[in-house]
């Protein structure tokens, strides 16, 4: 197997009339998905003059037909880039500047916005990408071109590019190949026994790497993926009802979404008898809400997945196999099959898993990932690619590009990796180097707090702990932190917010908090 389109075609052969992707308004069977994707592919190929390995922007709502559009771009010999209809114009323009796309696929609903897309060029003139409207697609497009396209496709060709937030404010588009997805989804399928009986309840947006696991493991195995309406995460009883109605047995959500169920103690009002696998990634999973899930759904599998977009989605994982205190960090585990990770200290040497008896952990270092999960690089950004995709410092003998994650980790006594924080979350305070993630971890067991984050106010040189939940006395909160962290890591200010802001991926929006916590 060398092409992700074989996932669809294999499932069509086995389950032609089975529902592949659906939402509250309906769905597409595998046969319908393949037919529509091929039509889109032929339509794009002819309209773009047979260009190859070029970006095709997809501007649609998150719905079944968008999956057909993604696969259609691949059938045409090109790759897709998801543009969210609600994405700020400034971010869209930055993405388009990096991509210089040939085309934009949209529908009547988003046609006006698609017509506003403008690609900035070096000469200052710019241009508008060619628009393809799904609602006006010629159903009689000649598909004879698809065999010719396919004959020249190889497994290192790109399938999609996902744009992550750059530290400079410029989005970076990680390019993922067929080989990346094939290798990654093989591991994901085996690790979590994804098969034709799997029914996913999808939470994450299609422009977020976590959705790749749901989508491509569904297509490979003849499973079914239900797109959960975003609004249901604001009405948790509707969320529970939806999961039960669709008999969802597998979910892969960000921890903030799982915490909604725990924070509102939703198992008092509804049960989830069909749910067998609860997977999570994207941010640190607080242990207290996880324990609530385990207490109420004890027979399910729980797994903590960790990885950046640049490793397709995940590079390490941990299947929960023991009890954890509410204030105990959940490990990120060990490397996935066919993926290798290692930890380097500031001296460039490998960090030993040997445990310091005083801390109960090893020394810390930066996580590196290597193998076929690692992306091709950043589209149109040679400088950032060279910074992050580097020659393996442990291998001086032949070229081997690996990914420098920027994540700080350490080992626990079980030999499992434990996340500390991003390197760029490190601060210098009172002469000490501090990871804000460690301060956040100390808050995990405090009763009454539903969601929380730590930010550092550079101008005033203070650590600010921001939380959502019951109003708690500052002195009480400080006392709780004194039990967990040294003096120099204690927050200098406590701020309660009515609701914690989340970004488009469902994660806590720390940038927004840092800029607006005084309001």
Image (cartoon, helix red, strand yellow):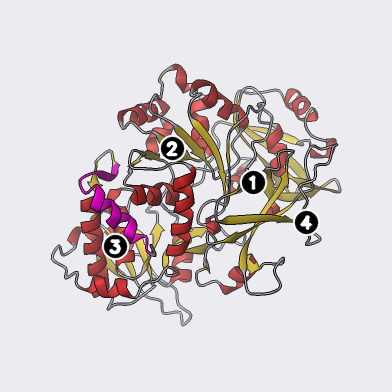
Outermost residue to the bottom: 123
* Residue 170 percent across, percent down from the top left: 55, 63
**Mark earlier in primary sequence (3, 1):** 3
Relative side of 498 to 192, left or right:
right
Q: Is residue 138 magenta?
A: no
In 3D space, how far apart are the residues under numbered discs 3 and 1 (Cα atoms)? 41 Å
In the picture, the quarter occupied by the N terminus is bottom left
- Highlighted range, magenta: 3-22
Mark 2 Cα-neighbour bin, 10 Å: few <14, some 14–19, many ≥20: many
Q: Nearer the viewer, residue 404 or 369?
A: 369
Q: Quick check: marks 3 and 4 in contact, CB under 8 Å?
A: no
Q: Which residue is mark 1?
A: 514
**Mark earlier in primary sequence (3, 4):** 3
Q: Is residue 16 magenta?
A: yes
In 3D space, how far apart are the residues under numbered discs 2 and 3 (Cα atoms)? 26 Å
Q: Which mark is residue 72?
A: 3
Mark 4 Cα-neighbour bin, 10 Å: few <14, some 14–19, many ≥20: some
Q: Secondary structure at mark 3?
A: helix
Q: Secondary structure at mark 4?
A: loop
């Amino acid at each position: 197997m060398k092409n992700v389109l074989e996932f669809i075609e294999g499932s069509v052969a086995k389950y032609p009339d089975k529902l592949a992707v659906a939402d509250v308004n309906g769905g597409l069977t595998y046969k319908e998905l393949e037919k529509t994707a091929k039509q889109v592919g032929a339509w794009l190929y002819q309209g773009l003059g047979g260009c190859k390995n070029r970006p095709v922007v997809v501007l649609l709502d998150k719905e079944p037909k968008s999956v057909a559009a993604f696969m259609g771009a691949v059938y045409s010999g090109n790759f897709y880039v998801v543009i969210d209809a609600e994405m700020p114009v400034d971010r869209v323009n930055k993405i388009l500047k990096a991509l210089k796309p040939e085309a934009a696929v949209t529908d009547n609903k988003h046609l006006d916005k698609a017509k506003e897309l403008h690609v900035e060029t070096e000469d200052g003139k710019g241009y508008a990408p060619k628009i393809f409207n799904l609602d006006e697609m010629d159903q009689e497009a000649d598909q004879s071109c698809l065999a010719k396209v396919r004959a020249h496709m190889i497994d290192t060709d790109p399938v999609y590019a996902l744009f992550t937030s750059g530290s400079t404010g410029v989005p970076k588009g990680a390019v993922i190949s067929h080989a990346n997805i094939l290798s990654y989804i093989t591991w994901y399928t085996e690790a979590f026994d994804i098969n034709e009986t799997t029914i996913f309840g999808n939470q994450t947006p299609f422009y977020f790497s976590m959705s790749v696991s749901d989508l491509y493991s569904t297509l490979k195995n003849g499973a079914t993926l239900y797109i959960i309406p975003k609004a249901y995460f604001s009405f948790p009883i509707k969320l529970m009802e939806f999961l039960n109605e669709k008999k969802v047995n597998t979910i892969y959500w960000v921890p903030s979404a799982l915490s909604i169920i725990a924070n509102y103690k939703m198992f008092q009002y509804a049960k989830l008898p069909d749910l067998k696998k609860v997977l999570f990634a994207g941010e640190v999973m607080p242990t207290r809400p996880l324990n609530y899930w385990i207490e109420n759904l004890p027979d399910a599998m729980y797994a903590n997945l960790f990885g950046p977009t640049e490793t397709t989605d995940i590079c390490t994982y941990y299947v929960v196999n023991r009890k954890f205190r509410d204030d105990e960090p959940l490990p990120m585990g060990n490397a996935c099959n066919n993926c290798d990770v290692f930890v380097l200290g500031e001296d460039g040497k490998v960090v030993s898993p040997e445990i310091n008896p005083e801390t109960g952990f090893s020394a810390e270092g930066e996580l590196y990932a290597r193998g076929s999960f690692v992306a091709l690089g950043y589209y149109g950004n040679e400088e950032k690619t060279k910074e992050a995709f580097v020659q393996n410092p442990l291998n001086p003998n032949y070229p081997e590009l690996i990914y420098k994650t920027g994540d700080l980790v350490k080992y626990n006594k079980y030999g499992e990796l434990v996340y500390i924080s991003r390197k760029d979350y490190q601060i210098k305070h009172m002469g000490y180097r501090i990871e804000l993630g460690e301060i956040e971890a100390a808050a995990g067991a405090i009763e009454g707090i539903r969601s929380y984050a730590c930010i550092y106010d550079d101008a005033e040189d203070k650590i600010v702990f921001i939380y959502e939940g019951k109003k708690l006395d500052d002195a009480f909160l400080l006392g709780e932190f004194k039990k967990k962290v040294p003096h120099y890591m204690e927050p200098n200010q406590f701020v309660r917010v009515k609701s914690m802001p989340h970004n488009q991926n469902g994660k806590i929006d720390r940038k927004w908090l840092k800029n607006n916590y005084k309001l």
